[in-house]
Image (cartoon, rainbow, N blue to C red):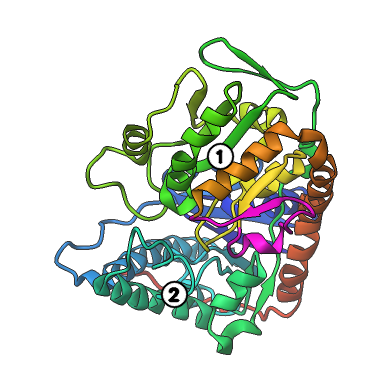
């Protein structure tokens, strides 16, 4: 069986299933990603780069679609080159969000195409317009609606699809929902877990230890989509009412979602200026190695996870798998994994006093929440790598079984 993975940041969500398949006898795994993709040991990766970016003269509403076409065209060139050399995949597993597989069926019409359908954008009821501080303007709404043209093509082109949560599934048009299976890719639960002896050495040399009043917050980048502004605005009250607690913040100064602030170089700078805190107690670590990140979670007394209704972060599941007491926003799809007062504590994303009070409860009465931490750890085991791989294998094997022979005709894109 030949399986081709396509993801601009390969391996991305395919890390575990690609690594598993690459070790199986009789399975040949190949991957395609952009020039900056990190790659995966044991998997051959072919890199590409679109020959140009979307034109500044292209209408604002369809600029992202042009960008998708450019990605798709470059990948098509690569696919046709592979085809000319005799390569024929049985199954293509891809994240289509950047347009990379728009023309995959033109190169390999009989290969079965499985799409990772991460997100179908909405103008109401999801991330856009959720935060009144950042209202959705009409041009933004029109751009979102136009952006879904790419995702509709992706849904139409694929033979099967996967999405990680029930809520993400519900966002897709009903006409395509039967095509999409709900499968989470999994996290490395076996390499996580509580460690009452854990320590974390900060850049200053200070050492924090499990069991101390330590608040943790993690995001790929520190930005409103992941509630960084709500966290920072609740923090002064927490620091005042618990004078010995320490705060560890992991995340970069870039933007993963949304946009940069207009009056500051990044959200960290802006929110620190608006909410001055003692930097002897509040520690910004930036982006850290996984080993450090693991220690951050293991020393945590209270882990705060706030998010717009958007894709679920691996960090939430990893915090749960580390046995953290999680204080999380009462937003979708967080509700699928956190149940208030059963395996975590839920808070209103916008109520700063409520956020502060729940964090302070966790800091001052840790024994009261011992069972919640245990329940959090147990709940996270449902998201193991093994569970994810077992379920990913089903559509891959089913697709490979029904693949038809490929014609030998090929052509070259001009």
Q: What range is drawn magenta here?
A: 330-350
Q: Would residue 67 appear left or right of 40 to someone viewing this image?
A: left
Q: Which residue is mark 2?
A: 122
Identify the image quadrant of residue 334: bottom right
Q: Residue at x 39, y 37 (%)?
A: 253
Q: How far is disc 2 from disc 1 in space, using C-alphas?
A: 26 Å
Which quarter shows the N terminus? Answer: bottom right
Q: Would residue 278 appear left or right of 343 to someone viewing this image?
A: left
Q: Nearer the viewer, residue 333 or 31?
A: 333
- Does the stretch in magenta take in 339? yes
Q: Position of residue 128 (x, y in %)?
A: 40, 67
Q: Are marks 2 and 1 in contact (CB under 8 Å)?
A: no
Q: Residue at x 38, y 36 (%)?
A: 268
Query: Is residue 317 placed above or below 286 in the rendered structure?
Result: below
Q: Residue at x 74, y 54 (%)?
A: 21
- Does the stretch in magenta take in 283? no
Q: Position of residue 341 (x, y in %)?
A: 76, 54
Q: Position of residue 220 (x, y in %)?
A: 50, 43
Q: Residue at x 66, y 42 (%)?
A: 42
């Amino acid at each position: 069986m030949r399986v081709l993975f396509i993801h601009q940041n390969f391996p991305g969500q395919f890390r575990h299933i690609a690594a598993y398949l690459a070790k199986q006898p009789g399975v040949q795994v190949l991957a395609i990603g952009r020039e900056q993709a990190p790659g995966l040991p044991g998997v051959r990766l072919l890199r590409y780069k679109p020959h140009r970016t979307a034109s500044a003269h292209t209408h604002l509403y369809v600029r992202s679609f042009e960008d998708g076409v450019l990605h798709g065209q470059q990948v098509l060139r690569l696919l046709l080159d592979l085809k000319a050399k005799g390569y024929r995949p049985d199954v293509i597993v891809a994240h289509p969000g950047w347009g990379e597989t728009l023309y995959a069926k033109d190169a390999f019409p009989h290969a079965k195409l499985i799409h990772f359908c991460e997100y179908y954008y909405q103008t109401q009821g999801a991330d856009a317009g959720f935060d009144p501080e950042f209202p959705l303007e009409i041009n933004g709404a029109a751009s979102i609606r136009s952006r879904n043209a790419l995702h509709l093509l992706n849904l139409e082109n694929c033979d099967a699809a996967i999405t990680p949560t029930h809520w993400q599934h519900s966002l897709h048009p009903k006409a395509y929902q039967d095509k999409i299976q709900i499968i989470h890719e999994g996290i490395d639960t076996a390499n996580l877990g509580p460690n009452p002896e854990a320590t974390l050495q900060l850049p200053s040399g200070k050492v924090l230890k499990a069991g101390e009043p330590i608040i943790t917050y993690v995001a790929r980048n520190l930005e409103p989509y992941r509630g960084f502004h709500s966290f920072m605005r609740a923090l002064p009250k927490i620091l005042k009412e618990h004078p010995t607690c320490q705060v560890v913040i992991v995340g970069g100064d870039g933007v993963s979602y949304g946009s940069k602030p207009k009056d500051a170089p990044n959200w960290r700078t802006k929110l620190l200026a608006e909410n001055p805190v003692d930097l002897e107690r509040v520690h910004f670590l930036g982006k850290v190695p996984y080993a450090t990140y693991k220690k951050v979670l293991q020393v945590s007394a209270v882990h705060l996870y706030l998010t717009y209704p958007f894709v679920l972060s691996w960090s939430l599941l990893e915090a749960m798998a580390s046995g953290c007491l999680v204080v999380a926003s009462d937003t979708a799809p967080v509700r699928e994994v956190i149940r208030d007062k059963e395996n975590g504590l839920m808070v209103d994303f916008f109520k700063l006093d409520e956020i502060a009070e729940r964090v302070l409860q966790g800091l001052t009465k840790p024994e009261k929440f011992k069972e919640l931490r245990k329940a959090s750890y147990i709940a996270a085991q449902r998201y193991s790598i093994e569970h994810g791989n077992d379920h990913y294998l089903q559509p891959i094997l089913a697709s490979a079984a029904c693949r038809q022979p490929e014609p030998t005709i090929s052509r070259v894109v001009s």
